[in-house]
């Protein structure tokens, strides 16, 4: 490992932080108070070293990526989240886009003969795109390419679909799963604390609803991801509270694959007055989340949002996954002013990015089955 845990402990002059480091060494869970203490007193070098120790204990140098592309059915949305630079309210839908089922199927067909393993489908909440619409879409995708893993619909989209169809969460999830839905992305979680949610996304599904939808998916044998939007008006206790609720559900179901911290971007939205977090703050957040979320197998840095260099840097701060090739198929973060205005990387680009920091690049599928180990492959 890059730095022994005993060295980390001996180099720390703070007794409270030493206790936390000892818990990490002994593979013991840290408390909420410990998490807050890390935010308040943990220097980047300290929390980064602990996070890297955990990362290497779990995964060694292995760093995962996958070959995927996104479909964004629409950016027209009935909700008005303050942080969103992407959606256009249904009342102003002429400013947005709406894809037909056939247009989306054409996007899938464009990858015929290519070794893509996952399609990621998320977008705005459009009142005309209901359960029946998306069931038909998934059935057609699966008929055309049965092996393609469909990871689709945030809990926000699902909550709207189920309520409009007058279905329980459990029945709605069963119908979508039967139609071809394989797993859920982690979007829509934002910050669970109601006092923050009220200010930034008051009109969409609350924390309990988000968690209930993911629990229902897990109970059907499906996996999902979890996210947290950070770096806006939240306080440290809200971050810890958010992660605690995720950790508790993971204890109960074991259904989460990965945790993805999402950096708030302030371009062209109703929260443009809020300054963005610094690189140091980003890396501290990644590190502390790796330490706190002991029952999450994977920690992902979503490179289209962070940028390639910062995603690469995060591999030293607990991260062991940098998402996938994307193929310039998402506008959610480029419209918010992210570092990546044309988010696409070839497999070769991803492999080189990982190798440059002496990590082992491994292509995975959505469920982290190894597709190909590139550590011994020479790319031309």
Image (spheres, rainbow, N blue to C red):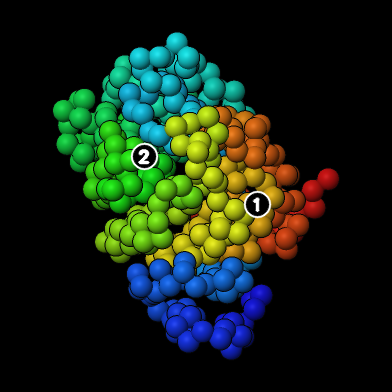
Asked if residue 38 shows in the view, the reply is yes
- Front of the two marks 1 and 2: 2
Between 149 and 236, the one nearer to me in the picture: 236
Instruction: State whether residue 361 is above or below residue 130.
Output: below
The residue positioned 48% from the left and 14% from the top of the image is 95
- The quarter in which the C terminus is drawn is top right
The x and y percentages for residue 112 are 59, 26
Instruction: State whether residue 6 is above or below residue 145.
Output: below
Mark closest to the chain's N terminus, 1 or 2: 2
The residue positioned 31% from the left and 16% from the top of the image is 128
The x and y percentages for residue 246 are 34, 57
Is disc 2 surrounded by few (<14), some (14 to 19) or many (20+) residues within 10 Å? many
Is disc 1 surrounded by few (<14), some (14 to 19) or many (20+) residues within 10 Å? some
Please give the residue where the numbered disc 2 appears in the rendered image. 200
The residue positioned 36% from the left and 39% from the top of the image is 200
The x and y percentages for residue 325 are 62, 40
Between 90 and 74, the one nearer to me in the picture: 90
Please give the residue where the numbered disc 1 appears in the rendered image. 310
The x and y percentages for residue 314 are 61, 58
Q: Report the disc number at residue 217.
A: none
**Are dots 1 and 2 in contact, CB under 8 Å?**
no
- The quarter in which the N terminus is drawn is bottom right
Is 194 positioned to the left or the right of 351 in the image? left
Instruction: State whether residue 378 is above or below residue 267.
Output: below
- Report, in whole angstroms, how far the alpha carbon at label 1 lies from the one at label 2: 26 Å
Q: Is mark 1 on a helix, strand or loop?
A: helix
Kindly indicate the quadrant of the structure image that contains residue 326.
top right
Is 11 positioned to the left or the right of 183 in the image? right
Asked if residue 26 shows in the view, the reply is no
Q: Is mark 2 on a helix, strand or loop?
A: helix
Instruction: State whether residue 330 is above or below residue 291.
Output: above
| Residue ranking furthest to the front | 273
């Amino acid at each position: 490992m890059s730095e022994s845990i005993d060295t980390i402990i001996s180099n720390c002059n703070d007794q409270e932080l030493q206790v936390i480091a000892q818990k990490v060494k002994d593979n013991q869970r840290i408390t909420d108070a410990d998490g807050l203490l890390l935010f308040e007193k943990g220097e980047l070098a300290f929390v980064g070293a602990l996070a890297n120790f955990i990362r290497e204990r779990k995964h060694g140098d292995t760093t995962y990526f996958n070959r995927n592309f996104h479909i964004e059915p629409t950016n027209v949305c009935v909700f008005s989240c303050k942080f969103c630079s992407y959606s256009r309210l249904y009342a102003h839908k002429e400013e947005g886009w709406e894809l037909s089922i056939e247009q989306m199927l054409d996007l899938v067909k464009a990858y015929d003969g290519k070794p893509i393993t996952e399609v990621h489908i998320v977008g705005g909440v459009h009142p005309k795109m209901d359960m029946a619409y998306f069931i038909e879409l998934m059935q057609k995708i699966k008929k055309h390419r049965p092996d393609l893993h469909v990871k689709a619909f945030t809990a926000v989209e699902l909550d709207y679909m189920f309520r409009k169809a007058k279905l329980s969460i459990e029945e709605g999830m069963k119908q979508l799963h039967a139609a071809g839905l394989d797993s859920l992305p982690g979007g829509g979680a934002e910050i669970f604390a109601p006092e923050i949610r009220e200010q930034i996304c008051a009109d969409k599904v609350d924390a309990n609803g988000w968690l209930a939808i993911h629990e229902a998916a897990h109970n059907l044998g499906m996996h999902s991801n979890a996210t947290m939007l950070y770096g806006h008006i939240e306080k440290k206790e809200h971050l810890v509270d958010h992660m605690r609720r995720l950790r508790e559900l993971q204890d109960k179901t074991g259904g989460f694959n990965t945790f993805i911290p999402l950096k708030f971007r302030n371009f062209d939205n109703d929260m443009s007055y809020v300054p963005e977090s610094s690189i140091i703050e980003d890396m501290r957040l990644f590190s502390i989340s790796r330490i706190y979320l002991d029952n999450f197998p994977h920690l992902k840095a979503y490179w289209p949002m962070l940028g390639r260099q910062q995603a690469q840097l995060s591999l030293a701060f607990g991260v062991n996954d940098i998402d996938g090739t994307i193929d310039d198929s998402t506008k959610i973060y480029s419209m918010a002013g992210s570092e990546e205005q044309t988010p696409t990387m070839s497999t070769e680009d991803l492999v080189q990015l990982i190798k440059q920091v002496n990590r082992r690049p491994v292509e995975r599928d959505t469920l982290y089955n190894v597709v190909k180990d590139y550590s011994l492959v020479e790319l031309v």
